[in-house]
Image: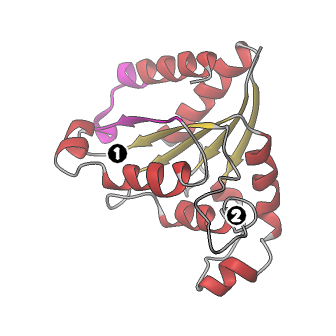
């Protein structure tokens, strides 16, 4: 039986000629072939403001463009996130998306005294797929992959996602056609497995 999988494209540029888009399309193709149900969210196509205060986060209404994203996250059994590493972290637009979507009452319990006890999104797994210009090994060893660890621990695991796996793809500025074909094949296989 197939999984319900939500793909979140976190690349802030909606043009389809980026590697992140090719990887997401390949994953979706493989998943559909294997019988998984797929939904997709492209953050670059959504219209929402950045949050500027705790009060906005706790009390302002969720922007209309993000309501479907919450519905899809609730629907999903597995979340796959794609984004490029910019200045050592996720792009600001994608971070703004996460801050907006992960509101109290949805991603965090409304009980301000014990927000970590209840994990409203428990029972779901996730995979983070990140592209970067530097070698992935350098990012892991020298930079200790801090931004990926923060996303895993402080956001996804904090609200209940387990397990959270990662795939880091380095040296994207020097990828050859052969390398891209290999990465696309790997993503298709990952999609078939629902991993």
Rendered location of residue 12, percent (x, y)? 55, 58
Q: Quadrant of the N terminus?
A: top right
SS category of the residue bearing label 1: loop
Q: Name the residue under label 2.
A: 109
Q: Can residue 179 be seen in the rendering of this structure?
A: yes
Q: Which residue is drawn at 73% across and 24% down?
A: 3
Left or right placement of residue 68 versus residue 12 in this view: right
Q: Which residue is drawn at 78% across and 71% down?
A: 63
Asked if the residue under mark 1 is in contact with the one under mark 2, i.e. CB atoms within 8 Å, the reply is: no
Residue 165 magenta:
yes
* Residue neighbourhood size for the residue with mark 2, other residues' Cα within 10 Å, grouped as few (<14), some (14–19), many (≥20): some
Mark before the other along the chain sequence, 2 or 1: 2
Q: Which mark is residue 132?
A: 1
Magenta stretch?
Answer: 163-180
Left or right placement of residue 182 versus residue 87 in this view: right
Q: In which quarter of the image is the C terminus?
A: top right
Distance in Å between CA atoms under marks 2 and 1: 34 Å
The answer to whether residue 86 is above or below residue 142 is below
């Amino acid at each position: 039986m197939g999984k319900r999988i939500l793909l979140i494209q976190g690349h802030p540029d909606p043009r389809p000629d980026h590697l992140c888009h090719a990887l997401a399309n390949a994953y979706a193709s493989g998943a559909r072939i294997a019988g998984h149900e797929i939904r997709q969210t492209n953050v670059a196509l959504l219209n929402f403001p950045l949050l500027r205060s705790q009060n906005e986060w706790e009390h302002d209404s969720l922007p209309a463009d993000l309501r479907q994203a919450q519905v899809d996250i609730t629907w999903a059994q597995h979340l796959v996130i794609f984004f490029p590493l910019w200045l050592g972290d996720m792009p600001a637009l994608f971070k703004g998306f996460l801050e907006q979507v992960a509101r109290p009452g949805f991603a965090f319990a409304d009980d301000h005294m014990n927000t970590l006890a209840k994990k409203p999104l428990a029972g779901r797994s996730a995979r983070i797929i990140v592209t970067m210009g530097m070698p992935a090994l350098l990012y892991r060893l020298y930079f200790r992959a801090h931004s990926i660890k923060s996303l895993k621990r402080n956001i996804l695991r904090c609200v209940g996602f387990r397990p959270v796996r990662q795939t880091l793809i380095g040296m994207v500025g020097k990828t050859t056609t052969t390398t891209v074909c290999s990465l696309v094949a790997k993503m298709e296989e990952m999609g078939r497995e629902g991993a």
